[in-house]
Image (cartoon, coloured by chain):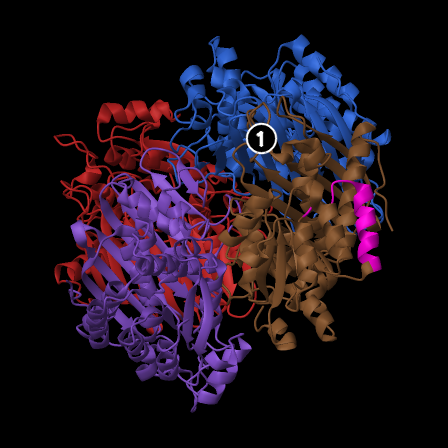
Chain colours: A red, B purple, C blue, D brown
Amino acid sequence: MGGNPVIDMLGRRLRLGVVGGGPGSFIGGTHRQAARLDDRWEIVAGALSSDPEKSRSQGREIGLSPERSYASAPEMLEAERGRADRIDAVAIMTPNDSHFSYASLALRAGFDVICDKPMTNTLEEAEALLRLVLETGRIFCLTHNYTGYPMVRQAKAMIEAGRLGVIRLVQVEYVQGGKAKEDDPPPGPGQPWRFDPVRGGPSLVLGDIGTHAHNLLRFVTGLEIEELAAEVGTVVPGRRVHDFAGALLHLQGGARGSFWVTQAAAGVENCLGIRVSGTLGSLEWMQEVPQVLHFKPLDAPAQVLSPNGPDNFPLAIRSARLVKGHPEGFPGAFATIYSDAAEAIAARIAGLEPDPLALYFPDAGDGLAGLRFVSAMMESSRKGGAWTKPERG
Amino acid sequence: MGGNPVIDMLGRRLRLGVVGGGPGSFIGGTHRQAARLDDRWEIVAGALSSDPEKSRSQGREIGLSPERSYASAPEMLEAERGRADRIDAVAIMTPNDSHFSYASLALRAGFDVICDKPMTNTLEEAEALLRLVLETGRIFCLTHNYTGYPMVRQAKAMIEAGRLGVIRLVQVEYVQGGKAKEDDPPPGPGQPWRFDPVRGGPSLVLGDIGTHAHNLLRFVTGLEIEELAAEVGTVVPGRRVHDFAGALLHLQGGARGSFWVTQAAAGVENCLGIRVSGTLGSLEWMQEVPQVLHFKPLDAPAQVLSPNGPDNFPLAIRSARLVKGHPEGFPGAFATIYSDAAEAIAARIAGLEPDPLALYFPDAGDGLAGLRFVSAMMESSRKGGAWTKPERG
Amino acid sequence: MGGNPVIDMLGRRLRLGVVGGGPGSFIGGTHRQAARLDDRWEIVAGALSSDPEKSRSQGREIGLSPERSYASAPEMLEAERGRADRIDAVAIMTPNDSHFSYASLALRAGFDVICDKPMTNTLEEAEALLRLVLETGRIFCLTHNYTGYPMVRQAKAMIEAGRLGVIRLVQVEYVQGGKAKEDDPPPGPGQPWRFDPVRGGPSLVLGDIGTHAHNLLRFVTGLEIEELAAEVGTVVPGRRVHDFAGALLHLQGGARGSFWVTQAAAGVENCLGIRVSGTLGSLEWMQEVPQVLHFKPLDAPAQVLSPNGPDNFPLAIRSARLVKGHPEGFPGAFATIYSDAAEAIAARIAGLEPDPLALYFPDAGDGLAGLRFVSAMMESSRKGGAWTKPERG
Amino acid sequence: MGGNPVIDMLGRRLRLGVVGGGPGSFIGGTHRQAARLDDRWEIVAGALSSDPEKSRSQGREIGLSPERSYASAPEMLEAERGRADRIDAVAIMTPNDSHFSYASLALRAGFDVICDKPMTNTLEEAEALLRLVLETGRIFCLTHNYTGYPMVRQAKAMIEAGRLGVIRLVQVEYVQGGKAKEDDPPPGPGQPWRFDPVRGGPSLVLGDIGTHAHNLLRFVTGLEIEELAAEVGTVVPGRRVHDFAGALLHLQGGARGSFWVTQAAAGVENCLGIRVSGTLGSLEWMQEVPQVLHFKPLDAPAQVLSPNGPDNFPLAIRSARLVKGHPEGFPGAFATIYSDAAEAIAARIAGLEPDPLALYFPDAGDGLAGLRFVSAMMESSRKGGAWTKPERG
């Protein structure tokens, strides 16, 4: 992430308009930090809340000019289209049920889009959105941010380069404790949108973290899931949404796998982990210590790889900002997604070819794959764990 | 493991006869070290090989007297029955397909038995063996040695004491790389018994390590598996035996779980691990660093527990020999199983009550549960992952 | 680091002018990321190189306007003083021998200053600079960035709150391998400034990393070094600069300590570590895994503390941007220094009281303490390890 | 540790008589387990206490025959000399101040000796004991047990093989919390012998653990300390014995080092650690996780080595009993010392050449080096940290 290819190509930073993510929102702050870190974006416009008044005042709170602190996303899109210094892209960080409509509006208004995951709440929306992306020819970046970690990209690059040989076994898990309490949410009206199956999506755990785990598996291994046998359910009493999901997997090429996600593991912080074994060795990575990648070759000593350390592949190197031994963490990984998308957008504007290594950010195809996975998981679970093929192609 | 309750009760050590486990065998050396470590056993007799000549000579190689280096197990049992200083128990460490016959012989000859896992190769044998144990009234100890680790026992004790609240989620995995190579075993005649489905049992991976993982789950949580949806199979080409197995689990009390075992994860050493989450927190343990137990309470800092460190429960304390900070490892855990069995046997001989904490070694009931689990796994896998209830009661 | 107190207080971001740190510089990129992350600073002016042409062009490369891409720091200071939208502060990230002159110029020109460490190359300069800071009444922030890690601040807060009781023992080490090679730098002219004892300071290892280790010890424990017995020297042949230093320490209140720093430990990345033991327990932290703090109480289980996890103190909480389990790393720690300085500066401008927790960034007094420490280390070493008192007060 | 070279050479186990280490003693149980584990020793005689009655009864408690449960060590030595089945060696595990007299008695009576560390309490005794060993030609094994860990031996072998190149930097520390409390020991008469400067030696911390750290440094690096600048002292108030010691080191060949030991680090368990850096990389090992050795090569990925894993040297392999992934811990390391000594003694008795790899157990020369180190540490400390040369040759 050295240099600034956006300024190099355009002589300026890209201009971003944000939808959602007001000051109190964790994900909003995270997106805006990610946009700022590598200095490829200026956040110049926003519609931060579905409440028009709040939307305007929160825009000013995060430092937008009053004139570009809009009352709503449609207003922003309309006004920005008419400006000479119009925004280059729209970033969407709203509750899941509105991703589809905001993204569609932005694409139709001619903007590139950066969108939080899951891409949509339903498979139908995901299919429609991918079609729209293809029709409009805009860039669509989905923030499966964990794929931005240097050591996740190193794992992908090592597998692409054949360091593991043929992939045989994959384990992926995403275990959290954030929704372990029975009184979370407290009963009664006014529950957070995530706990409402309509707004948060048909399966909270799958939308929230299952799609991350699924995307990580696909990103690292380069393999699709051909069949799965799953259970999706709820272990915390009194809850209308899913808080765990497990599956056995058949992957392309004959590999077998295990999948396990939950938000009800009391006391666990954020254990998104993956182990991939091939004929030549295994790789292990875990998000709580993202600065290390364990490589266990078949007949040689285990290795501990680190960002910008020895034997890093170009894809890993370009996503690490610091010299070795200086861990970066979550914000850097998230920023890599934003910065790669910026490089792709700037290249398009400048009529240049982007660095091919900039094109590893997740896109609408990945988003659709995620929704198809969620759909297949739920179908298999309904059928008592019957082997089920996620839709493909 | 301080003091020597066997000498205290009997004024002497117990006398052990061993079946199998000649000098070249990993498991044989391991059993004998386990018997020696706490000085509760003298190994005085043996039939170490199915080849009579080798059996006699190998007995002398491990330091047995010529007269008690027997040509075969039946010879040993017959001869020992007639001696004043006859052995007190028989330890069986032969290939899996002979456990049943040797154990039956020993029990019928009136000896207590220590037997390597899996208890038998078939469910029918396991049922018959348990009946025989009950009929003869002998002590039967199954060496699911991983339950001897102080921190595994601490986990069990913490859960028994309610420290996790109600159990909701369990993940257990046993991942090894020892059978990752395609040329292991080399094709042709003379393959090791483990790779022969008849001698090694119907499912290599389940017999070898799956029963350990299953036993660990039951030991730590105190819960039985009510239903499972499984796949058992082979990822290394050209192999007649299973090298991976996965399952989703329904446990007693409504807990949900994931199970994953394989011996084909190239480069991985011996990752037997468990994570248990209850309403009040989670516990995590992994065999490669057995001296630590991670306890993650719901709303308090994560703890790292260690043998004989603060907050150890009596069950953990009695299985640790050293002051804190002095890790013991695998031999100590294995020895704990032998030493507890010794205490139970000595108490029986002396007509005394054993320490109740000595009675946590796995027994024939655990062995039968293991075979029932293997059977249910294979049945579910044959039925395309259908939810299947292991036999109970 | 939630909210944006600078915008809250001033209705705008602070404006920063940078001196040094052109596009190829590691530390330049690091400073600018730190300034951007929390959106409290706009980098609007710069003099990035001692070469006037390069200085102007590099300013534009990092996105400055041509008119504020200055040829030199004096030019920048002069021009900015006359602007209505003048910069609020100057950030200095030049080779060590120029810190003093640039900082003095900036202070005299009426600007607040953020300066890379070591504050100066000589003790005399450090004394003069502190006097100038006091005379001018400007805010001076020294980027001992490691004190910005949430878990370092948690350690400090725990000790301030008495969680360790009376401090008895301290070990601090900073071990790197970056200068382990004999041909680093290659012989001949044009060596990097760090390897020139005049430009890089009298002791490379002490200036580069020794002052960080010293500052970390003082920050975490709150104790000054009363006496030290030291050796400072060179283990890589053919080098004119120091590459290791060790010392025994007498600290305030009778605590004893050990100090060890080197840049010649081949293969080691960036092991800045500290262990502090008091009457009630010990704390351990290491920079390569900065997201964990080990707390080992006297008679209770060891704890693993994490940012925004249970039992975090306010000082730690305000320096963590994310929910628990999302590691931040080095850029976040560096940004905390910039953001706290911004809060202090904005409060001064607004005539408000800053949050007292914003005032933990290192200042000129800390910088002088660092130079006094370097001086005492070298004096003790020259005197054959004689106990030597760093100047105080 | 496969096979049983003692039985192979002698057709029997070696017979051991023990002095000290009654049932309640940690170190006694440890020695006896170490003797039993590899089945090379039978413990057949003992004088377990300085109280004659207790000595006899405790012998029987640990399973000795009444006739060989002696009242005192002299009685044992006298009686055993006259037996046909006399003991082959004497193992001494008494308080430090009696090591010299018991070892001298045993050597003079013609027995080989295994002795706990420190070898003696005073330098003069150590010199006299080494002379006696040389005069009598007996084997003398000093139980610096930490050198028995496979990964410590791997480190030694890697350095001997040149994997680190020329050694430049060494850090060794031994940090414990066992003596952190002010009321340990409680004031008044009847204090444990360790807290009595006469019985426990002139410096508790140096005798107890400092000699271990010193021996580990010498064993791993193969280098002697040429000069040291030290402080030895007490941080816990009201104590007559030392509880910390630190030093800077000059090693053979120009390497520099740091040494730090304490028993007053509240909450720390047993952190004996070493880092060695040479021109080609660094090695790191720590006793609390003894099953891993970190190797950080200069320009290649860091490695995690494990017992019987890839790239193990023969010296490491022979000290590991189990297949990789099965950690052994402290008892195995201690047993390796006993088993190697047994192999050397059996070879002497049989008139055979022992395996050269059996001869890495610490001996009287190592014991003398330890006492010389203690003496130099105390002299340097008395002289205000003056560089002091430990006696050599």
Question: Where, by quadrant of the figure, is residue C44 drawn?
Answer: top right
Compared to residue C233, the image places residue B231 above or below, namely: below
Q: Bounds of the magenta span? A: D117-135
Closer to the camera in the image, B119 or A23: B119
Would residue B294 appear left or right of C212 to someone viewing this image? left
Amino acid at pointer 1: Val
In which quadrant is the N terminus of chain D drawn? Answer: bottom right
Q: How many marks?
A: 1
Q: Seen in the image, is C360 located left or right of residue C202?
A: left
Q: Looking at the image, which residue is at 70% across and 47% down?
A: C265
- Reply yes or no: does residue D129 show up in magenta: yes
Q: Is residue B306 above or below residue B377?
A: above
Compared across the picture, whether A11 is left or right of A139 comes to: right
Residue D48: x percent and y percent? Answer: 59, 49
Q: Residues within 10 Å of mark 1 (few under 14, many from 20)?
A: many
Q: Can see residue A214?
A: no
Q: Chain of mark 1?
A: C
Let me know if residue D357 appears in the view: yes
- Picture quadrant where residue C318 is located: top left
Query: Image quarter for residue C104?
Result: top right
- Whether B234 is drawn above or below A361: the answer is below
Q: Secondary structure at mark 1?
A: strand
Q: Give whichever of A135, D66 is nearer the camera.
A: D66
- The x and y percentages for residue C268 are 64, 48
The residue identified by callout 1 is: C276
What predominant SS class does the magenta segment belong to? helix
Give the camera-side residue of C225 and C150: C225
Asked whether D252 falls inside the magenta stretch, the response is no
At x 81%, y 38%, the residue is D376
C145 to the left or right of B377: right
In percent of width and height, residue D107 lies at 76, 56
Q: Is residue B127 above or below residue D192?
A: below
